[in-house]
Amino acid sequence: MTDNVSIVIVSHSPKVAEGVADMVRQMVGDEVRIAFCGGNPDGGLGTNVGAIMAAIEEVYTPKGVAILVDLGGAETNSEMAREMLPAEMAANIVICNAPLVEGAIMASTEASCGADLETVRSTAEEFQA
Amino acid sequence: MSSNLNGRLLEATCQTISEHADELTRLDQAIGDGDHGINMKRGFDALAAAAEELQQLDLPSALQKAGMLLVMNVGGASGPLYGSLLMAMGKAAVDTPSCVDDVVSMLRAGVDAVKARGKSDVGAKTMLDVLVPVLEAIEKNPASPCAAARQAADMGLEATRAMQATKGRASFLGERSIGHLDPGARSSALLVHAICNVLEDS
């Protein structure tokens, strides 16, 4: 696998998370490693810190991991997950303040071209403007 | 019933969340995403399931372990918020708090962690509208900390009714969030009362 920034999708809904990851794979291709998670620890709507940590670890690269989230708890739980990982990993993980679907496509497109983590993040976030 | 204080606190807090889960969910359905009761119950059920292990730990370790269990089991933003509260309280705790000052410094560390985690403070219609007044009330009334904490919790909770939410899902409602109690403030007030019940009994 190429040394590109990886993407993690975090949604309250497992179906939304999987669907966004599918869109990224089809539109951007396999140049970017992508992991996704959704649902609370019981499988209902919500987010799950353990699952987010596992998703990050699945695609982690020192080049960086950009996380795209949907709403409130997804962001708070992603921040918690990042803090619970070793500090040297946490330093290479960002949470993008961007809409989930559009941000994921923008971030992945940028990542697939080899951009660094900060560029990937700002590209996703600029979409809001 | 557990014989030691930590065990009784654990039992009482788990019980109050379980008994009020439906009420918390109803409050959350009004202005949030309707999962606060079920999420808190999932988290506190995990604490109840680990009761035996938690009771064998000293207070700092028990609080940190309990906080971690909430983080991993709640499934909503209240997991990291209540989890950070307990983990920070655990880090600041002494093995056997012997005076009100010990409790105040522990609680202050916890409240600061909630502020940082939620990027929030009093007045945003959150659990902090109960926790911060409770902390201040205990600090000002070392002679009757439980009575002061109960009153501050009730007043803090009621004050959230008139507030407009600026954090969390409720903030999407703008002015329409006014007129409803905040579910997180309600769960915090429930926990304060449950803890006071145990402490006043011991």
Image (spheres, rainbow, N blue to C red):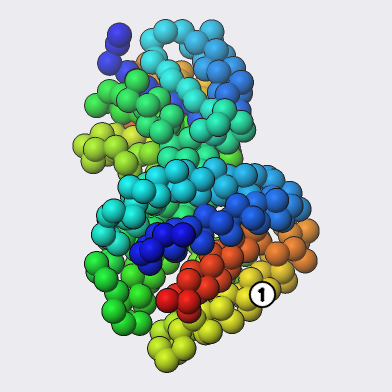
Q: Position of residue B165 (x, y in %)?
A: 65, 61
Instruction: Check disc 1: other Cα within 10 Å, few if <14, some if 14-19, many if 20+.
Output: some
Residue B45 as seen in the image, left or right of residue B97: right
Residue A100 against residue B183 in the figure, above or below: above
- Asked whether the viewer can see residue A73, the reply is no
In this picture, residue A14 sits left or right of residue A54: right
Residue B120: horizontal and vertical position, in percent? 50, 62
**Amino acid type for the residue under numbered disc 1:** Ala
Which residue is depicted at the point 26% across and 59% down? Answer: B58
Image quadrant for the C terminus of chain B?
bottom left
Can I make out residue A89 in this image?
Answer: yes
| Nearer to us in this view, A106 or B33 | B33
Question: Residue sitting at 55 percent across and 18 percent down?
Answer: A18
Of residue B168 and residue B193, the one placed in the foreground of this image is: B193
Please, what secondary structure does the residue beneath circle 1 have?
A: helix
Q: Residue B83's spot in the image, x, y percent?
A: 42, 52
**Residue B101 placement: quadrant:** bottom left
Front residue of this view, candidates B103 and B111: B103
Q: Which residue is mark 1?
A: B159
The residue under the point 29% across, 37% down is A85
- The chain letter under disc 1 is B
Expressed as whole percent of the image width and height from the top left, the position of residue B130 reads 56, 71
Left or right relative to A118: residue B37: right
Q: Nearer the viewer, residue B70 or B175?
A: B70
User: Which image quadrant for residue A70?
Assistant: top right
Residue drawn at (57%, 28%), measured in percent from left and top? Answer: A43
